[in-house]
Amino acid sequence: MRLEIVVAPDCVGCAEARAIAEEIQGRFASVEVHLLELGGDRPIPKQVVATPTYLLDGAVISLGNPRMETLMRLIRRRMND
């Protein structure tokens, strides 16, 4: 399972998104957590319309930072599928 969190340098909520990424990686060792930093030459994924954006296995699950409980519930649900 892969959780991608798209962040940008000038994004107000992205500091919290980075902290959430660390928290999820610590709680779910089997989840690959990747921060995708926008800017420079990196193309914006087509499904990203705001930062931060959370994608779980390529599907958008949150625009903006979700509540930690909600994010953990979505990850656990996907693990049980």
Image (cartoon, rainbow, N blue to C red):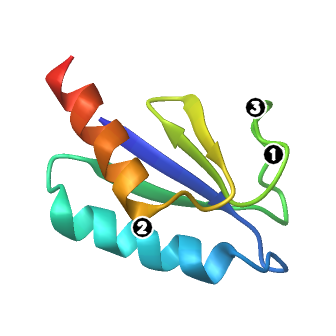
Give the SS element for disc 1. loop
Mark nearest the camera among 3 and 1 is 3
Q: Which residue type carries mark 2?
A: Ala
Tell me whether the residue at label 3 lies in contact with that at label 1, contact meaning CB atoms closer than 8 angstroms. no
The three-letter code of the residue at mark 3 reads Gln
Q: Residues within 10 Å of mark 3 (few under 14, many from 20)?
A: few
Of the two numbered discs 1 and 2 on the same chain, state the one appearing first in sequence: 2
Q: Residue at x 77, y 53 (%)?
A: 42
From what the image shows, is residue 31 above or below residue 9?
Answer: above
Residue at mark 3 to residue at mark 1: CA–CA distance: 12 Å
Q: Is residue 29 shown left or right of residue 59? A: left
Cα–Cα span, label 3 and label 2: 19 Å
Q: Viewer-nearest of labels 1 and 2?
A: 2
Residue 78, image quadrant: top left
Classify 1 as above or below 33: above
Q: Quadrant of the N terminus?
A: top left
Q: Nearer the viewer, residue 23 or 70?
A: 70
**Residue designated by label 3:** 47
> How far separated are the C-alphas under marks 1 and 2?
21 Å
- In the rendered image, residue 31, in percent from the top left (x then y), is placed at 25, 47
Q: Which residue is mark 2?
A: 21
